[in-house]
Amino acid sequence: MFDYLFYRIYWWNKVVVKEKDLLVFSTLLGISVFKILNLSTLVFMVLIWRDAISHYHKWMQIVLMCSVLLCDYFLYINGSKYKSIIEKFSGKGKAPTKDALLVGYIVLTFVLFFLVVLTGAKMSK
């Protein structure tokens, strides 16, 4: 699913945004943002459940973000895997089921993240 998300972000940046210079880098940042939101949501849920939200420091989030970005770099860019992902999905045309699942995933990612952040903010007061 993340490969398809990578392709759709790449397609969006290329076709809609018309990015030319930093197309792959922009796509890398896009996929990393979704993974960071997912991981942050999980971390915040555990911290809320354990009533330890006040123990989470900003530097921990920075380490998480840098780790995801670095892992995604090695996963997609370093071995040029992004080229095979783009080739794999570009010739197939539209996949409405995958696109619908992707939109659901994106919406759910943002909704859950903001709910967890709001819950954590209420608990830390």
Image: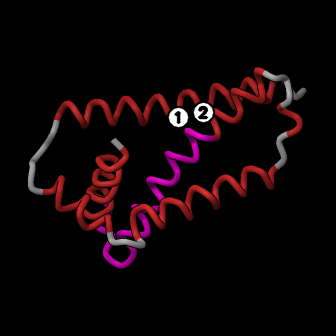
Which residue lies at the image location 16% right of the left edge and 39% below the top edge? 95
Q: Which quadrant, please, contains the N terminus?
A: top left
Other residues around mark 2 within 10 Å, as few (<14) / some (14–19) / many (≥20): many
**Residue 64 relative to residue 122: left or right:** left
Q: Position of residue 120 (x, y in %)?
A: 77, 28
- Give the residue at mark 2: 113
Q: Residue placed at 77% from the left, 51% from the top?
A: 60
| 56 vs 111: above or below | below
Query: For residue 82, which quarter of the picture?
Result: bottom left
Q: Residue at x 30, y 30 (%)?
A: 101
Residue 110 numbered tag:
1
Question: Separation of disc 2 and disc 1 at Cα?
Answer: 5 Å
Residue 2 is situated, as x and y percent measured from the top left of the image, at 37, 46
Viewer-side residue, 68 vs 16: 68
> Is residue 33 shown above or below 79?
above
Q: Position of residue 35 (x, y in %)?
A: 52, 46
